[in-house]
Image (cartoon, helix red, strand yellow):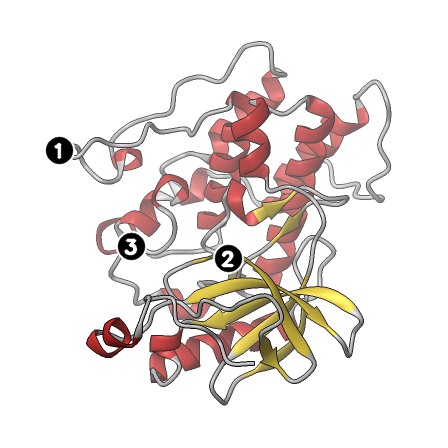
Amino acid sequence: MTPSSALGGEAAAEASPRTEWGFEEGAELAPSRFAVRLLGGGERYESILAWDERLLSLVVVKVLRPHLVHDEHSLEGLADEVSMLERLRHPVLVRALDAVLEGPRPQVVLEHLEGPRLSTLIRKYGPLEREQLLPLGLQLFSALHYLAGEGIAHLDVKPSNIIMGAPARLIDLSIAQPLHALAGKRSPIGTDAYMAPEQCDPRARGPITAAADVWGVGATMYDACAGRQPFARPGPDEPRFPQLTEQPAPLPEKLPLELRELVMACLDPDPAARPMPVEAAGELELLVDALPRKLVLGRFRVRVR
C-alpha cells in the first residue's frame, strides 16, 4: 500500500517537499508492520501507532519525516537514538524493539505503553494526589540516577514525555546525548519551559551536565504539585527564558515541607546546588514510606541526612 500525500494533490507536492507522510490505516511502514493511526510528531519524526505481525502486538513507530529521509544529519541522529535505546535498560525508560535505518521510511520501533501522559492528567485534573506524586518523583529520580551512571543526559524531561503507568515511564530520547558531548554546546537545547538555565544559555551558564535533568524533574514535579509550570509562558515582547532571571512562586503550603524544599532545590539556578538524583530519591522514599497506604517500590534504602 502506498502512503498518501498530506499536501492535497500532485501540484502541491511538486511545489515543496512533503513534511508529513499522511499514512492511511493499513499502510505498510515496514515488512509485517502496518499503520493504525497517527499519534503525533515533532520536528524530525511522526509517531505512528502500528500493528506488528511478527510481534503480534501494538507498537509505536517513530518515522523520520519524508523530507528528511536523505538528510545525513537526521539519519545520524536516528542511528544515535537507536544505539542509545538498545544500550539503556531501566524499568522507567521506554524500550526499543526494532529499527530500520535505511530505505524509504527510516524508523525506530518502541514498545506501546498503556496510560495517559502526565501532561494530560495535569491539564484535565490539576495537581496530582500525593499517592501518585511521590512515587512518580521517586521513579523519575531512579531513572536519572541510572542515566547519569551511564554517562547520558536526557535533556527533555517534561510532563508530555512521561507515561503514567505502573511504573511511570520516561520516553523520547531523541535529543539525549552523552555527557562528554555536551561540553561544546553553544545554543539552547530542550523544551523551553522545562530547560535548566544552562540549557537555555550554554555559553554563559554552561557547561550542561547531568544536573540539567534534575532541573527537568524539578520543573515537572512543580507542575504536578501546583498544576502549573514553574514559570509563566512569556509574552511576545518578553524574554524567551524567564528562568534565567526569575524565581518560581512558592508551592502550595498544603504539600509536605520536605517535598516543597526538594522541588525548589532541584530548581536552583546553580547546578552544583541541586541534589544528586540518589539524594532526591532517598528523600522521596521517606515520604512514600509515610503515606497512609504503604506502596512497594523496591528496597531503595539510601538515606540523606
Mark 3 neighbour class, 10 Å CA radius: few under 14, some 14 to 19, many 20 or more:
some
Query: Measured from the top left, where is residue 304 in percent x and y?
Result: 67, 34
**Label 2 sits on residue:** 154
**Label 3 sits on residue:** 188
Residue 281 falls in image quadrant:
top right
Q: Is residue 188 left or right of residue 278?
A: left
| Residue 262 in view in this figure | no
From the image, state whether disc 1 or disc 2 is nearer to you. 1
**Label 2 sits on what residue type?**
His
Question: Given contact means CB atoms under 8 Å apart, are the residues at marks 1 and 2 in contact?
Answer: no
Count of marks, rendered view: 3
Label 1: which secondary element: loop
Q: Residue at x 38, y 44 (%)?
A: 196
Direction top: furthest residue = 254
Which residue is more in the foreground, 294 or 128? 128
Q: Is residue 160 left or right of residue 168?
A: left
**Label 3 sits on what residue type?**
Pro
Label 3: which secondary element: loop
**Label 1 sits on residue:** 237
Direction left: furthest residue = 237
- Numbered badge on residue 47: none
Quadrant assignment for the N terminus: bottom right
Which residue is more in the foreground, 21 or 159? 21
Quadrant assignment for the C terminus: top right
Residue 231 falls in image quadrant:
top left
